[in-house]
Amino acid sequence: MNFAAIDNLQYSPVCSGSRSQNRKLIFFGSLLDDESTCRWTLDLASELEKRTGERQNLCQANRPFDATMPTVLMASLSQPTSGLRRLARRTDAIVVLLPPEDQAYFRCRLFEQDLGRPIIPIVCRDDRASQTMPRWLTAHQPIRVRQGDDPGLGVRALARRLLRQRVGLALSAGSAKGLAHIGVIQVLEEQGIEIDAVAGVSMGAYVGACWCHGHDGKTLEALAATIRTRKDLLTLTDPVFPPRQGFIRGAKAKNRLAKSITNTSFDKLVRPFHVVLTDLETLGSTTISHGDVASAVHASLAIPGICEPVTLDDRLYTDGGASDPLPVDVLEDLGLDRIIAVNTQPSLADLEALSMTQGHPGATRWAGVLKATGSFFNQQLNFFAQGNLLDTVMRGLQAAQVRLAAASAERADVYIHAYPTGTPWYAFDAYATAIETGRTAALEQLPAIQTLMSTSTS
């Protein structure tokens, strides 16, 4: 079959909301060298064949091919001809392989506009590259491949996208209890569960930022282990006086994160990452996935009444957990096909199990700080003591979060409840307990995760 006959073919248009797997013809265009393009197309055809059980033909776009067979068409976009554009318009999916260059982004944009159809971009990044991806490109949720990484990661990510099998991970708020996310991530890595996009809020945003930067689960645990005592925690505390909008500024925590992820921006992360904030003007949730990562996470961590709100682009933001403590909806809106949600906050049953006679766990933990002055002065001077200011603020916020998170959990395909008991919300020195809780909860849900990953999307 040649170019002249392509106009006579009848293809069903690809709808972004469709879950059909009946893809027949994939246009794989490239602005990279021929050797890289050939390797990608060969690996993609092999991966699609393995996942679908259908033999995939691999052809050059300027050669005859049988359009009745599943086919990957390889084409160079250095000088796209009118015939090449006509062919691309008739295919079921258009993939473009890009180097991290402004000129390549510009040419890809022109190609897409000329086609009048969305493309699936793959950006092959070099850590030394300084170019920032333009906003239109990041909106396409490009597949990101870093030099030196396993090349199969990008190929498998592309195959999941073409077959509508993308997996999203939602990481909840939870303060120190959110360190349980690390344990869940470790289990996912050990089991070879690959994630296509992450949405995080509050502590889930902090852990998610470090992971999406490229730190593995063991490195995340090592970072958490740097806070071993309450004295270590105080080094990250920057009090505000007078505390007009909050007691803590949060800049030290932001700087610590920026150091851990080398002051990176969203477009340089290894996978798409979305941070949830609460807009103090609209009182609704907002998602940020561009610009400086540490600044966005800083805003998502700003607990109302405890931390000062954060200004970004002339708008005032606070803890994303106040409006969306488990961001399953963010991944739904992005079109992820399968969603794993991790909640490190208590359920209603957990709260009911806390006896009023036992009190809030934070009270007994921090009572020892002022033990020498007696319980009376502890109650008067320790803001963290049960019923005092900061404890009351957190428990009031939690009252809304618990119910919002429960509603979000119902929409996830797999729900992991990794709530560490017996430690207060500020016990960052209890990282080992939190991480082990995450591991245990993830292992309990592992059969459900494996079933989800092995099931074809209908």
Image (tube, helix red, strand yellow):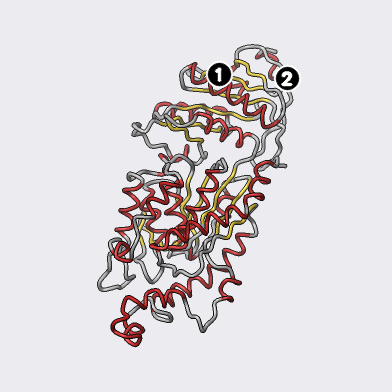
Q: If you read the primary sequence from the N terminus, does the residue marked by circle 1 or circle 2 appear first?
A: 2
Name the quadrant of the N terminus.
top right
Question: What's under tag 2, amino acid-wise?
Answer: Asn
Per the image, label 1 sits on a secondary structure element best described as strand
Q: Residues within 10 Å of mark 1 (few under 14, many from 20)?
A: many
User: Residue 195, relative to residue 322: is it above or below?
Assistant: above
- Figure quadrant of residue 240: bottom left
Left or right of 240, for residue 119: right
Q: Position of residue 344 (x, y in %)?
A: 52, 61
Q: Position of residue 207 (x, y in %)?
A: 44, 52
Q: What residue appears at the point 48 percent right and 61 percent down from the top-left corner?
A: 173
Per the image, label 2 sits on a secondary structure element best described as helix
Left or right of 54, for residue 241: left
Question: What's under tag 1, amino acid-wise?
Answer: Ala
Q: What residue appears at the point 51 percent right and 68 percent down from the top-left corner?
A: 421
Left or right of 239, for residue 266: right
Residue 8's tag is 2
Q: What residue appears at the point 65 percent right and 59 percent down from the top-left corner?
A: 410
User: Residue 296, relative to residue 247: is it above or below?
Assistant: above
Residue 75's tag is 1
Q: Position of residue 126 (x, y in %)?
A: 39, 30
